Amino acid sequence: MPPVPPLELHTILLIAAAGLFAGTQNALAGGGSFITFPALLLAGLNPLAANMTSTIAMFPSQATSAIAGRRFVDDVGPLTFRQMFAISVIGGVLGAILLRITPPTFFERLVPWLVLFATSMFAWGAFRKQPLHAASTMPRWALVLTQGAISIYGGYFGGGIGFLMLAALTIAGQQIRAATATKNMLAMAMNAAATLIFAFSSLISWPAALALCAGGIGGGLLGAWLIHRLPPRIMRIFVVGVGVALTIYMFLR
């Protein structure tokens, strides 16, 4: 694996701008990784380094959003929130370890398929009709397996996990507001586990991570201001467009 390239000041500023947009996008509709991941690729990072750096950089703003909505968190069907939290942490650790031991060349070949899957999940979740009330439940074993698989995927790559969890939580019996808050906390749990593991990797570009982090925090504040002023549908359409373009680019690569 080639070393992480040094970044010039103008590149760092552009990465910070990408973080600002991603933080805003996360606050309005989700899918910020569709902005940060390609931005880091364009800055010269390889896919493995870009994925790890993006996960670390966006964790603080993600944690802030999760903690802000913690009063709406609830148990999930047959499992308590603490059990779901533990599953998410374990899955995040396993996914992060799996990523650390993945050969870089294999991951680079896998990325186009991961981006395609994540884009599909985002498009499905962004435009499907959200249920206002819980309508069904999920057996305990199915919920454990589903959340475990999502958590491992989240620690490994993470694109689209928000919509995957939102679908699983509503099927398991949560109402949409509780599902959104619970999803944010569980995503924070799996990404916290992954961040602790990635932080010791020599592939992390810390200047890029700090720039993304600063931009992401600013974007979260901007998104909170825009949430009642800008139609989220516009942001969703833009993110799906970015995902499609990135998928095509990665396959052509």
Image (tube, rainbow, N blue to C red):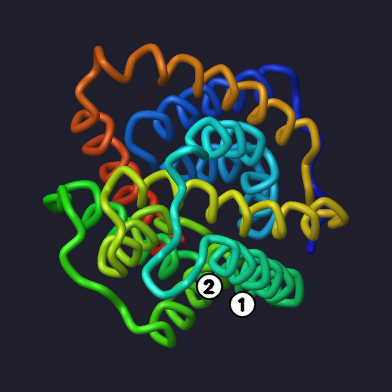
Residue 109 tag number: 2
Image point (54%, 66%), residue name: 84
Crowdedness near tag 2: few (<14), some (14–19) or many (≥20) residues, C-alpha within 10 Å? some
Q: Foreground: 129 or 30?
A: 129
Q: Measured from the top left, where is residue 26 in percent x and y?
A: 43, 35
Q: Measured from the top left, where is residue 20 in percent x and y?
A: 52, 22
Q: Measured from the top left, where is residue 167 in percent x and y?
A: 29, 62
**49 left or right of 186?**
right
Q: Are marks 1 and 2 in contact (CB under 8 Å)?
A: yes
Q: What element carries label 2?
A: helix
Residue 91, image quadrant: bottom right
Image point (31%, 43%), residue name: 177
Image point (72%, 36%), residue name: 209
Q: Name the residue under label 1.
A: 106
Q: Foreground: 62 or 18?
A: 62
**131 left or right of 39?**
left
List the single residue furthest toward the bottom. Answer: 141
Crowdedness near tag 1: few (<14), some (14–19) or many (≥20) residues, C-alpha within 10 Å? few
Label 1 sits on what residue type?
A: Phe
**46 left or right of 243?**
right
Q: Is mark 1 on a helix, strand or loop?
A: helix
Image point (43%, 87%), residue name: 141
- Tell me the CA gap for discs 1 and 2: 5 Å
Label 2 sits on what residue type?
A: Arg
Residue 1, image quadrant: bottom right
